Image (tube, grey):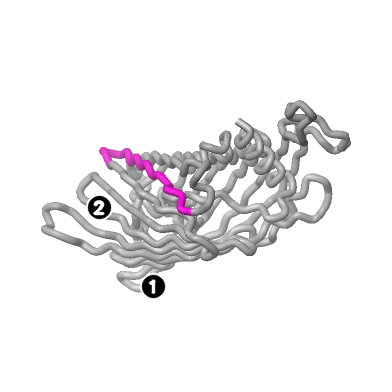
Amino acid sequence: MLKKKLGLLFFGLLALTAVKAQDAHYSQFYAAPLYLNPAFAGTADGPRVILNHRNQWPGINKAYRNTAFSYDQYMPNLNGGIGIMVANDNQANGVFKATRITAVYSYNLKVNRKIMIKPAISTSYSSNSVNTNNLIWGYDAQGTPIYTTNDPSAGNLNASYLDFGTGAILFSENFFGGFSIDHLTEPNQSFDGGNSPLPRKYTIHAGGFIPVGKRQYNASISPNILYQQQGSNSQLNIGMYYNRGPIVAGSWYRSSFVNGDSFIGLVGFKYDIYKFGYSYDIITSELRASASGAHEFSLSIQLQQPPSKAKGKNYKRVNCPSF
């Protein structure tokens, strides 16, 4: 019990200072396409609805939970895709909460018959709050937690700001790669009028599809790499998907370069217009004794493109993983 309370204090104070705040990350990064790169807006066969949920380190008293909802589709009149995403972070069992609403537009640019480029832009509104009443400020002589403080600024603190991002993907039938930059203006997220910029996040990702086995099995492997840098922190994901009919399996290794972070295993299933994925992070860092890994779920609904809105001549579907 004491360890859980100390964990609550640690994560609550981390959210309160927000000096080195980092974005959430998903192990199923392609299952959260707009979160990964705004250029993925409108890259499916029709309108697409996606729900993502990540419960990270559940052994530390609900340390970190993230939920995201997104919708995107291709718009022939705009020669590109549009999308909207709502993401919510809940840290330290409600001590820190953040909600971000993002609007996205991507543009189709045909290089030749086989290669396409999609640049994109995004605009976000973020609202953050900290409830310091749930923080433990110390212990009395009997070991009872102290939840009060003489700091007049304690209580419910709020901050909001506008944010901007950009990205692009280049793809052919069996190869895809791209980059994105979030927090272009490094917005100030301070709760007290000070200076607490949110560092830019740089993402580079690439992968491909390689058919394997007999054609009737509809099987392929998809090696992938993802690199992200935000402030002084970075991570590298290297792994592979295996696809056979409606079943998808995958595994990755994630490293922070300072030390190994986790092994990730995934299973996914496709049925009709639905895609469901589950992944689990096996922690390899020093947190493994108490953090209990991370559970992640994704649900995607692929709707049909309305007949009256036929795709334009510059439209080409991105053949990339779904999880």
Dot 1 falls on a residue whose secondary structure is loop
Name the one closer to the observer, 91 or 310.
91
Residue drawn at point x = 65 percent, y = 43 percent: 11
Is residue 167 visible in the rendered image? The answer is: no
Identify the magenta region. Answer: 270-284
- The numbered mark, 1 or 2, whose residue comes first in the sequence reads 1
Decide: few, some or many residues near mark 1? Use Cα within 10 Å; few <14, some 14-19, many ≥20: few
Amino acid carrying mark 1 in the image: Val
Label number found at residue 243: 2
When the figure is inspected, residue 97 is found, relative to residue 198, above or below; the finding is above
When the figure is inspected, residue 143 is found, relative to residue 269, above or below; the finding is above
Q: Position of residue 5 (x, y in %)?
A: 65, 34
Name the one closer to the observer, 257 or 232.
257
Residue drawn at point x = 68 percent, y = 55 percent: 20
When the figure is inspected, residue 281 is found, relative to residue 132, above or below; the finding is below
Residue 136 inside the magenta-drawn segment: no
Label number found at residue 275: none
Main SS, magenta residues: strand
Q: Position of residue 104 (x, y in %)?
A: 54, 52
Q: Position of residue 171 (x, y in %)?
A: 37, 66
Is the C-beta separation of discs 1 and 2 under 8 Å?
Answer: no
Q: Quadrant of the N terminus?
A: top right
Dot 2 falls on a residue whose secondary structure is strand
